[in-house]
Amino acid sequence: MTVIHSPVPHAAGGRRQGWSWAGLYPWYVTLLLSFTHLMSLVDRHLLGVVLVDVKAELQLSDTQLGLLYGSGFALLYSVISLPLGQLADRVNRKNLIAAGLSLWTFATVVTAFSTSFESFFLLRMLVGIGEACLVPAGMSLLMAIMPGHLIARATAIFATGGGQGRAAALLIGGPLLTAFAAMGGITLLGEHLSPWRGVFLLAGLPGLPLVVLLLLLKEPRRGDQAPQLRIIDTLRAMKPRARAYFFHFSSFTMVATVIWALSAWALSLFVREHGLSAAQAGLVLGTVAVVTGPTGNLLGGWLLDRLTLMGVRGGPPLLVGAVLWLGIPPALLFCLAGDVRLAIAGYATLQFVMAFANAPGWMGTQLLSPPENRGIVMALFVACYTSISIGIGPVIVGLLSDHVFTGQDSLGGGLLTTLIFVAVLGGTLALVGRRTFIAIVGAPDRGDAA
């Protein structure tokens, strides 16, 4: 296998930039992409806040609500990620992100005027298409502008936006819905809109100035590479490294499955097994996400950078495997504790530990891939873990709860069984695949280790 030493670019001479705009600009881009990521997750998860109102007004079944929120959205998002990843390797990346943001912002705003399942579903599809542009093009952009020894931290900041988006949807969407309900809805251009419609309308507005800021960025030069590869060309290029990709993709998919199983069922567990109201449980989940998401992401990126500077090989799979194994004790506490305070502590710890895996998961994919393939490979990576984690993880918990476990704590039993199985499997895959990862990537680029 070919060993790639210096898989990521770094600053001239390997030295850190000073406090000049040239040195701060990559961080400005990183923060802008992170906020864009936040907005994408707000628009994606906002439906969960208003499900009851949407169901009542549009007379939808639970199956239709599930299609709007989960599997239908994830499937299209995953499929469209591949051609959009190909575009990220060919076209202006910041323009691609701006176009995707424009599309999902438009779809979010227009959702406020939806009158049927069909129109709502079409708009959710558009949201998925727009959001599928972000991660492949955003990661490719970060790899092009960031020094090698800072890539993991920049990736962690980018990933943090996603976690904060989920928290914002819970913490901001609920109060907005309550405020609009107290007002009896809102009136726009002489047309009365119910409270949940006002939430969608307001949620889309921040996307408009964000598009302008993205368009004002400078697109980095791609050097001498000629990004003209087709998806089939990328798959052929991946074939000699298929074993490394399999272990890396599979192990991170297990991390995503843990996260989405918690996203789907944690609130219900607090309500059904600890007697909290939905509003109280939402406040708990949102607060935990605000605290654990950014700290876990940033510490995971920092730790990966430290391992790189220390010359530790195979840092990404090492961290992903450790995260999954270390998640088992807090999962036991969360699902089995009879005291709600202990359950909250277990849940918060589990979310904190899982957040450590984002930077090594995303960065590891980039390190395994040549520069001319990174957009498509990142899109394939996102497609794999999104379709499996969202499409399968929550369903397994529900099936176990319905058909294997019984009684008041059936949900806790189904969730714990899923979490432990997924953690053991994913942790083993990551650690077994580390040797193959090292064979492909070689020694880490330590940049300015001094």
Image: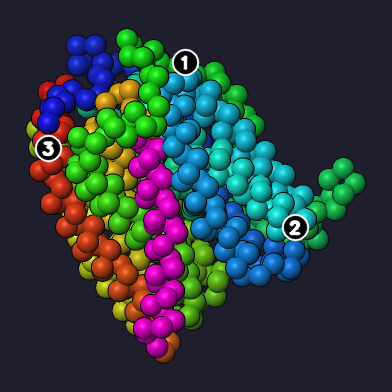
Residue bearing mark 1: 218
Quick check: 194 left or right of 391? right
For this rendering, which residue is in front, 409 or 231?
Answer: 231
Please tell me the numbered disc located at residue 438.
Answer: 3
Relative height, residue 435 to residue 270 (above, below): above
Find out whether residue 59 is within the magenta segment: no
* Separation of residues labelled 2 and 1 (CA atoms): 41 Å
Quarter of the picture holding the C terminus: top left
Residue bearing mark 2: 116
Residues in magenta, as a range: 377-406
Q: What type is the residue that disc 3 sits on? A: Ile
Q: What type is the residue that disc 1 sits on? A: Lys
* Separation of residues labelled 2 and 3 (CA atoms): 52 Å
Q: What type is the residue that disc 2 sits on? A: Ser
Q: Residue furthest bottom?
A: 407
Mark 1 in CB contact with mark 3 (< 8 angstroms): no
Q: Can residue 66 be seen in this snapshot?
A: yes
State which quadrant residue 128 falls in. top right
Q: Position of residue 444 (x, y in %)?
A: 14, 30
> What residue is drawn where x is 45% and y is 59%?
391
Magenta portion: prevailing SS class: helix
Q: Position of residue 186 (x, y in %)?
A: 80, 52
State which quadrant residue 273 falls in. bottom left
**Looking at the image, what colour scheme do you see?**
rainbow
Q: Earlier in the sequence, mark 2 or mark 3?
A: 2
> Element at badge 2?
loop
Mark 1 residue crowding within 10 angstroms, few (<14) / some (14–19) / many (20+): few
For this rendering, which residue is in front, 16 or 316?
Answer: 316
Q: Position of residue 421 (x, y in %)?
A: 26, 68
Mark 2 in CB contact with mark 1 (< 8 angstroms): no
